[in-house]
Image (cartoon, rainbow, N blue to C red):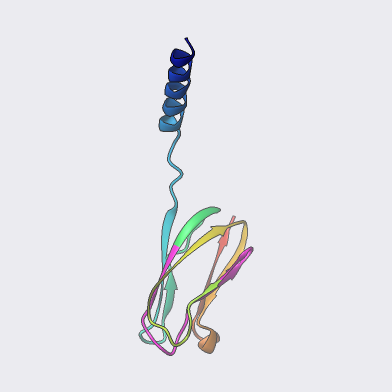
Amino acid sequence: MRTRTTAVLIAVIVAAVVAMPALAVTKITGTVGPGFTISMKKPTKAGKYTLVVSDKSSIHNFHLTGPGVNVKTSVAATGSKTFKITLKKGKYTFVCDPHASVMKGSFTIK
């Protein structure tokens, strides 16, 4: 009897886990360089994201700041860098720190 109860309980738990919707994390991208350009796919909703930055220049970096977020690549490094971020309501800015007056952008999560 105890074995049957345990088996039924396990079956119910497995069915519940399988029925739960997957908590998908949305991928967004940012790019800096090779010239004096910086861009980002601008999200509009709060939530968890994977930010993948393509840094194409050793004289630039990509720096994203906003409510609870402060991530950046290094100036000397190039290549791809991945960050796990959670966006909340508010304004976010992305800049190249050495060239912030000309290489910048922003978006707002409502």
Q: Does residue 1 lie above or below 50 as drawn?
A: above
Location of residue 24 in the rendering, given as x and y in whole percent from the top left corner:
43, 47
Residue 106 vs residue 9, the one in the foreground: 9
Give the magenta-colored segment's residue range: 51-70
Residue at left 42%, top 22%?
A: 11
Q: Does residue 11 lie above or below 80 as drawn?
A: above
Residue 86 in which image quadrant:
bottom right
Location of residue 103 in the rendering, given as x and y in whole percent from the top left corner:
49, 83
Q: Is residue 57 magenta?
A: yes
Residue at left 46%, top 44%?
A: 23
Q: Does residue 4 lie above or below 39 as drawn?
A: above
Residue at left 60%, top 56%?
A: 88
Residue 68 in which image quadrant:
bottom right
Q: How many marks are shown on the rendered structure? A: 0
Is residue 20 visible in the rendered image? The answer is: yes
Q: Is residue 43 magenta?
A: no
Location of residue 26 in the rendering, given as x and y in whole percent from the top left corner:
43, 54
Outermost residue toward the front?
2
Q: Does residue 16 lie above or below 63 as drawn?
A: above
Residue 85 vs residue 33, the one in the foreground: 85
Residue 78 vs residue 13, the one in the foreground: 13
Location of residue 83 in the rendering, given as x and y in whole percent from the top left corner:
47, 65
**The C terminus lies in quadrant:** bottom right
Outermost residue toward the top?
1
Residue at left 51%, top 54%?
A: 48
Is residue 45 visible in the rendered image? The answer is: no
